Image: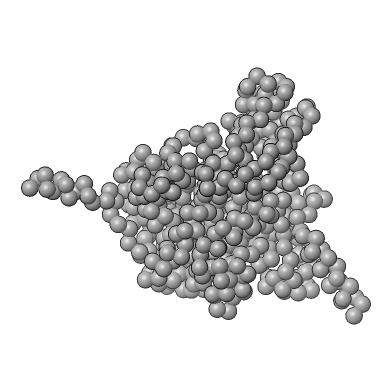
Amino acid sequence: MDLACLWVGLLLPLVAALDFKYHHQEEMEAFLKSVAQNYSSITHLHSIGRSVKGRNLWVLVVGRFPKEHKVGVPAFKYVANMHGDETVGRELLLHLIDYLVTNHGKDPEITNLINNTQIHIMPSMNPDGFEAVKKPDCFYSNGRENYNGEDLNRNFPDAFEYNNASRQPETLAVMKWIKNKTFVLSANLHGGALVASYPFDNGVPAQRKVLFCLSNTATGSLHSRSLTPDDDVFQHLAHTYASRNPNMAKGDQCKNKMNFPNGVTNGYSWYPLRGGMQDYNYIWAQCFEITLELSCCKYPREEKLPNFWEDNKASLIEYIKQVHLGIKGQVFDQNGIPLPNVIVEVQDRKHICPFRTNRFGEYYLLLLPGSYVINVTVPGQAPFLTRVVIPDNSQSYSALKKDLKLPFQVQQDSILGSSSSCPMTPLYKISSHSPTTKPQLFLFLLTLLHIFFK
């Protein structure tokens, strides 16, 4: 009898099946702790800080090396529920965790993904807001903001305008988290629409204000866009997610909402947003992030959650794979010493805040297949250029590995002493470079001519 019970026990899953329901803080914590305990070889649970009311901001790491950094293994993250009343993403990430850990060692795709990626999952950035929702609503609930009444997706430094919003504990915790970790790719999960939105969310302020006077930019009626130097990659990332979600890909499934061709939009084209998290990730953390709006209704009924999981499961997995796009490696001097804090960029796509190697001398550049010239810049030395051809290898769970050995010795003091971070001020305001597209400038001038000469 005892042997029979033992046999039955071995057949049972390590963690009880996760229900399709809304999990409040205590239930969510219990689930995360159970996963961390039962899958300790591939998971690590930690809190990156606390909310205004003292709730933990939990992150579960899934990977072959969940507790330590391994050179060559890129870090990926999902963040959900930064608006407390936008709830679908919160539950999807709990089910994603369950799916990853229970399929490791069984499903080759999931096993390869976990073995070659460090996946960080934060189900709720705004637990106070989620708990504050008493009457769920499709359009707005009082839990959108944090406990101090601040919108966390308007709370980050902005590269185009001064953002004087008081930094919240949740925001500061995320800023510290991404500063101390080399994240390569990310997505933040929202609700209230059905679209994959890519940077920039904001644009050049002076032009934007004039456009507001001329037309309703918030509806995208002028089709203006604010684009990054990596627009081809961002469009690819957004299409990767949207194309695998059958309803998102249609682009017109939310009544009384803007239609999005193929389920994709540039954030600024949709509506300008100051202090957003995705722009901050890209500019100051050199992490590519897009925003995923996953449901027309912000807080849908629980019985619809299984359908959301089925619609998003393939997209969530495929999007993580994109962290293996492009090229990665380390930069060494002629003596084979790894060089931190040196600039590594593609020659024709410089960033307003240059991409630099981390403390291990590592660099990661998300790039589509093609030929590129990589430019390494060390203070006091001529630029080091090398041409690379990047194959289509996103399905191989590894970017092209290319270590760069410089033909000179570098004094560590010279690179460690140089500025490793950009000031958190409107960088585009003090730069002559504008990311606004040429078609927008043309349309802007054409509109002015129409007003003055009609």
Percent position of residue 247, x then y: 51, 70
Q: Is residue 251 visible?
A: yes
Query: Where 252 falls versus 348 (above or below)?
Result: below
Q: Is residue 185 left or right of residue 93?
A: right
Query: Where 367 falls versus 268 (above or below)?
Result: above
Q: Residue at x 59, y 59 (%)?
A: 238
Instruction: Say which of 263 and 297 sits in front.
Output: 263
Percent position of residue 99, x then y: 38, 53
Q: Residue at x 12, y 48 (%)?
A: 4
Q: Residue at x 51, y 64 (%)?
A: 245
Q: Residue furthest left?
A: 1
The image quadrant that residue 268 belongs to is bottom right
Name the image colouring: one colour
Query: Where 253 falls versus 60 (above or below)?
Result: below
Q: Residue at x 38, y 66 (%)?
A: 306
Q: Is residue 153 visible?
A: no
Percent position of residue 110, x then y: 42, 48
Instruction: Say which of 66 and 283 sits in front.
Output: 66
Instruction: Say which of 180 and 168 sits in front.
Output: 180
Query: Where 34 falls versus 344 (above or below)?
Result: below
Percent position of residue 323, x then y: 55, 47
Image mark count: 0
Q: Quadrant of the C terminus?
A: bottom right
Instruction: Say which of 18 and 234 sits in front.
Output: 234
